[in-house]
Amino acid sequence: MKKTLIRKIKMPVFMAGEGKSEEGYCRWLSRLAVGKSLPIHIRAEGLSGSDPLDLIEQAVSKLSRMEYGRRLFIHRSLLLDADLLGKKPERDEKALQLADKKRFSLIWQKPSHEGFILHHFREFQNHRPPDQASAEKLLNKAWGKYCKGMDADGYGSVLTLDNLAIARSIERDLDKFLNKIGWQ
């Protein structure tokens, strides 16, 4: 009798962010999802831009190229630095409207990616650095070998599922998105 193989279909998830650090972080999340046997496939993409609207437009463009003639990404998320907001209010408003129209969940990193990563460490989970320089200084205390542009291996060398759980308790946007894609 012929044995039938059953292959689980993984839900495609698009995650992007400004720069290599965010892309590396998204790839690290993807590896954790595989390790937990979650039925999702996270496609991580890096972006580069000057403000939220520019970044969201790039993400929409990349997503359109990836989806052309293929299956759609049901869930989409962007990691954006909160310190980019407020410099051009009219562009910020357009960015939020476009993100909503294209069904992107926005994960705001306060004030930046370094401040966001800081919240993965229990002893720093309640720190709220006011700016990029303060976030980098505190992160250096938590993780002396952290550097910008880190890849998934770099994140994986220090961060674990426990660190993600710590971050989820503080970073509500991250927790909301992970719950949305079935990551309990």
Image (cartoon, grey):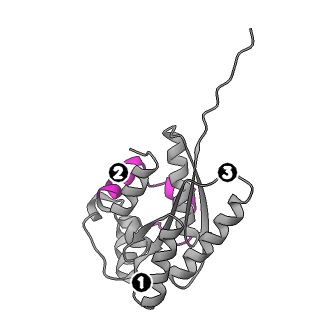
Instruction: Identify the residue under disc 2.
Output: 165
In the image, taking residue 4 as reference, residue 177 lies left or right, namely left
How far, Cα to Cα, is label 1 from label 3? 33 Å
Three-letter amino acid code at the position of disc 2: Ala
Instruction: Identify the residue under disc 1.
Output: 85
Secondary element at tag 2: helix
Percent x, y of residue 162: 36, 48
Q: Nearer the viewer, residue 154 or 32?
A: 32
> What is the quadrant of the N terminus in the image?
top right
Three-letter amino acid code at the position of disc 3: Arg
* Labels 1 and 2: the sequence-earlier one: 1
Residue stretch rendered in magenta on the structure: 145-169
Farthest residue toward the left? 126
How far, Cα to Cα, is label 1 from label 2? 27 Å
Instruction: Identify the residue under disc 3.
Output: 71
Percent x, y of residue 41: 58, 48
Classify mark 2: residues with Cα within 10 Å, few (<14), some (14-19) or many (20+). some
Classify mark 1: residues with Cα within 10 Å, few (<14), some (14-19) or many (20+). some
* Labels 3 and 2: the sequence-earlier one: 3
**Is residue 167 found inside the magenta-colored segment of the image?**
yes
User: Disc 1 or disc 3, which is closer to the eye?
Assistant: 3
Farthest residue toward the top? 1
Percent x, y of residue 155: 50, 58
Residue at 37% from the left image edge and 56% from the top image edge: 176
Q: Which of 167 and 102 is in front in this view?
A: 102
> Height in image: 51 above or below 5?
below
Residue 168: in sight, yes or no?
yes
> Height in image: 136 above or below 123?
below
Residue at 41% from the left image edge and 83% from the top image edge: 85
